[in-house]
Image (cartoon, grey):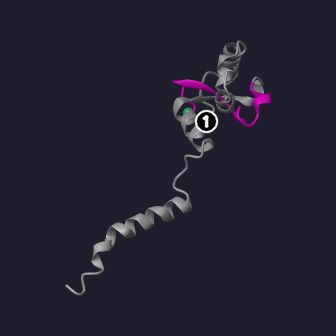
Amino acid sequence: MGMRFQRHGRWVYRDKRWPALRIAAKRRDGFKCVQCGARHRLEVDHIEPVRTHPELSFELTNLQTLCGKCHASKTRIECGHVPLSPERQKWRDLLRDMQRNPIEQKGNDHA
Ligand SMILES: [Zn+2]
């Protein structure tokens, strides 16, 4: 089991305790998404991510039932895939400027 597993928290889902815990969490939440109330594609999410709070991995109080959609959007935010950061946006703008002002524009004055 490498560090990568540990960091991403996947080892939790391989633990023998996980299946029972997952069912317990869903039962407690009434088999519906705690965010939008959906009853399909339910997944059990760690409120405090395993990555940062491994000691809470098997605490029922740290689990919540989410549908696939809510879970995916929460995970995306945690992983930092948020809309473009200011630096990123600046880089995009720079690239766009370069495309708009091609280098060959200069130097043809004496032709
Ligand atoms: Zn949902």
Query: In the image, residue 54 lies at what x, y percent?
Result: 76, 30
1, 44: nearer the viewer: 1
The spot of residue 28 in percent (x, y) is 70, 21
Residue occupying the far front of the picture: 110
Residue segment shown in magenta: 36-57
Secondary structure mostly taken by the magenta-highlighted segment of the chain: loop
Q: Which residue lies furthest to the right in this view?
A: 55
Q: In which quarter of the image is residue 106?
A: bottom left
Task: Give x and y (percent) for residue 103.
Answer: 32, 72
Helix, strand or loop for disc 1: loop
Q: Of the residues shown, which amino acid type is indicated by label 1? A: Gln
Instruction: Report the side of 90 relative to 58 (left or right).
Output: left
**Which residue is at 67% across, 19% downward?**
22
Query: Is residue 105 a member of the stretch shown in magenta?
Result: no
Residue 111 appears left or right of 7: left
Residue at the image position 54 percent from the left and 35 percent from the top: 72
Instruction: Tell me residue 109's x, y (percent).
Output: 25, 86
Q: Is mark 1 within 8 Å of ligand 1?
A: yes
| Left or right: residue 18 compared with residue 100 | right
Quadrant for ligand 1 reads top right
Q: Residue furthest bottom?
A: 110
> Which residue has dot 1 on it?
35
**In the picture, which quadrant includes the N terminus?**
top right
Please state, as top left, top right, bottom left or bottom right, where the C terminus lies in the image: bottom left
- Give the quarter of the image for residue 75: top right
10 Å neighbourhood of mark 1: few (<14), some, or many (≥20)? Answer: few
Question: Residue 48 magenta-drawn?
Answer: yes
Q: Residue at x 61, y 36 (%)?
A: 35
Q: Nearer the viewer, residue 25 or 52?
A: 52
